[in-house]
Image: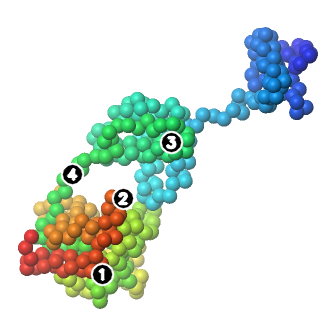
Amino acid sequence: MAGDKRGFGQIARLPSKRYRARYTGPDGLLHNAPVTYETRGDAEAWLVGERRKISRDEWTPPRKLSDAPRELTFGGYAGRWLQHRDLKPRTRAHYRNLLDNLILPTFAERPLKAITSESVRDWYADLDKKTPTLRSHSYGLLRTILATAVTDEKIPLNPCHIRGAGTTARVKKVEPATLTELATIAQEVPERYRLMVMFASWCALRFGELVELRRKDIDLNNGVIHVRRGAVRAEGKVIIGPPKSEAGVRDVAIPPHLMPMVREHLRKNIAGGKDGLLFPAADGTSTMAPATLYKVFYRARKIAGRDDLRWHDLRHTGAVLAAQTGASLAELMGRLGHSTPQAAMRYQHAAKGRDAQIAAALSALASGTATV
């Protein structure tokens, strides 16, 4: 390797026949150029530029290109976004699935600043149109992550501008069960599931809320269900925690016509004292899996002539029945435990005693003494 000494810095020809330039800086340390050069003139030009920075008091130690920060990719940013987000376990698992299967295959290695409106439109157009809900959820997640990137000053603007892409129309129109159909379904499931059917419909409880109900959550004196917890399954595990939203923590009045069934169920089917589950798995103590319920529910709905009825549609049925009593929107939202920014203020105005009136009116519907 040949080299020479100059008034400022050194230039050496390497075995590769390229030229390396280096010099001793104001800090007394030897600094190499971040790259090697094809010609001696290029190496000299770099040294001249460094000497000029020193004379102007603008000098900073040169860095190797490998030391320079890599451009932030969407995959790297999205991973940290998901890690730092305060999410329910099932929501986190859902977002992880959307990222891994629908978003990252296209955008993982793409720098944040290189994601354009056109690239977002191309990606969205290629998503499977046969799964509109997943399509809208994926777009909504991408838009949300990039909106945070704007807030973090990683990108100047959010490139997601497709109108309506984050929402989807209901694919299946829910047809509520009739009172006769509800009665048939309740009659055709095994006895220990009957109250579960009634709570799902007449009290509009979610499956996760039902399977975590315990004896202590039932106030027989006042005819009230205290909804305080829910069970969700995420990544193969059962996770017990607060209901789906803050509004999900609520007291639901039980229609009086159900109270005899409630008392009978508590007398015959509950083990474990006040913490005993109302609707446990077959072992009597663990959380019921959806598949266990579906085995008996699918048979019962078929007998009722409602093969199209999903378990969650019983909750929808309960909402329709409550609406038929004349309940206001705020009262319905409070009974169902819904929480949206638009409705949050309305919840505060729902009269506490009104829910018991709604429950009584529901029983009047069941007995045929009230008209819709």
Cα separation between marks 2 and 3: 22 Å
Say left or right for 103 vs 255. Answer: right
Callouts 1 and 4 close, C-beta under 8 Å: no
Asked if residue 177 can be seen in this view, the reply is yes
Q: Check disc 4: other Cα within 10 Å, few if <14, some if 14-19, many if 20+.
A: few
Say left or right for 279 vs 54. Answer: left
* Element type at mark 4: loop
Cα separation between marks 1 and 4: 32 Å
Cα separation between marks 3 and 1: 46 Å
Q: Nearer the viewer, residue 185 or 349?
A: 349
* Element type at mark 1: strand
Q: Check disc 1: other Cα within 10 Å, few if <14, some if 14-19, many if 20+.
A: many
Residue located beneath label 2 in the image: 341
Disc with the residue nearer the chain's start (3 vs 4): 3
Instruction: Report x, y in % for residue 247.
Output: 37, 68
Disc with the residue nearer the chain's start (4 vs 2): 4
Q: Split into 4 quadrants, where in the image is the C terminus? A: bottom left
Q: Nearer the viewer, mark 4 or mark 2?
A: 2
Amino acid carrying mark 1 in the image: Val
Residue located beneath label 4 in the image: 172
Residue located beneath label 1 in the image: 224
Query: Residue 251 is drawn in which quadrant?
Result: bottom left
